[in-house]
Amino acid sequence: MKRTAEAEAAAEAQLLALIRESFVERMPFNRILGIDVLSLHHDRPELRFAMRPELVGNYVRNILHGGVISSVLDVTGGLVAFLGVQQKLRGKPLDEVLERFTRIGTIDLRVDYLRPGSGEWFIARGFPLRTGNKVAVTRMELVNDQDALIAVGTAAYTVS
């Protein structure tokens, strides 16, 4: 029995490492955004990225482009959706879980911009609202280095 628990923990650690690698290194657009994974906790994953000149939308005010904000929130929501699927498939073979990852796609994304995206770095957090067999619904938020809420979002993702 103990071996099974140890094997399951090792498989989950391997899966989380693969998720981190996929989101940080394998997805070209995420590399452009400079996203780093801070936490892969299924109830509240966190991503971080630094302000860079390439991400500025308003050069006079030196604030993030709205497309960067929505993209980061979308990536965060997708991560939440996948982690929800991973929880539902706990104990299943790694190949089966990773195959489901390839099927996740955004159905709908809503972003509310609350204040200008100024700061030296930003953290995006995601929260699952519901993970079903076909659709996952998530809530996301983006804060700056002063913990000011920049934007919030909700999204639906296909997960089947």
Image (spheres, rainbow, N blue to C red):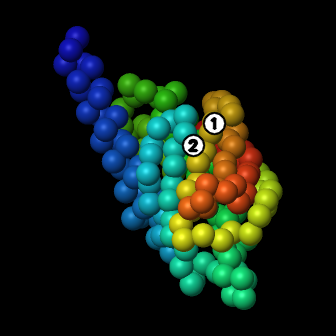
- Please state which of residues 26 and 96 is positioned toward the viewer in this rendering: 26
Relative to 63, 124 lies left or right: left
Residue at (69%, 87%) from the top-left corner? 59
Relative to 16, 117 lies left or right: right
Relative image position of residue 139 (x, y in whole percent)? 69, 43
Q: Which amino acid, by three-letter code, is at mark 2?
A: Val
Quarter of image, res 54: bottom right
Label 1 sits on residue: 128
Asked if the residues shown at circle 1 and circle 2 are in contact, with their CB atoms under 8 angstroms apart, the answer is yes
Relative image position of residue 148 (x, y in whole percent)? 67, 57
| Measured Cα–Cα span from mark 1 to mark 2 | 6 Å
Residue sitting farthest toward the left: 3
**Label placed on residue 136:** none
What element does badge 1 sit on? Answer: strand
- Please state which of residues 158 and 34 is positioned toward the viewer in this rendering: 34
Residue at (66%, 48%) from the top-left corner? 140
**Label placed on residue 80:** 2
Crowding near pointer 1: few (<14 within 10 Å), some, many (20+)? many
Residue sitting farthest toward the front: 146
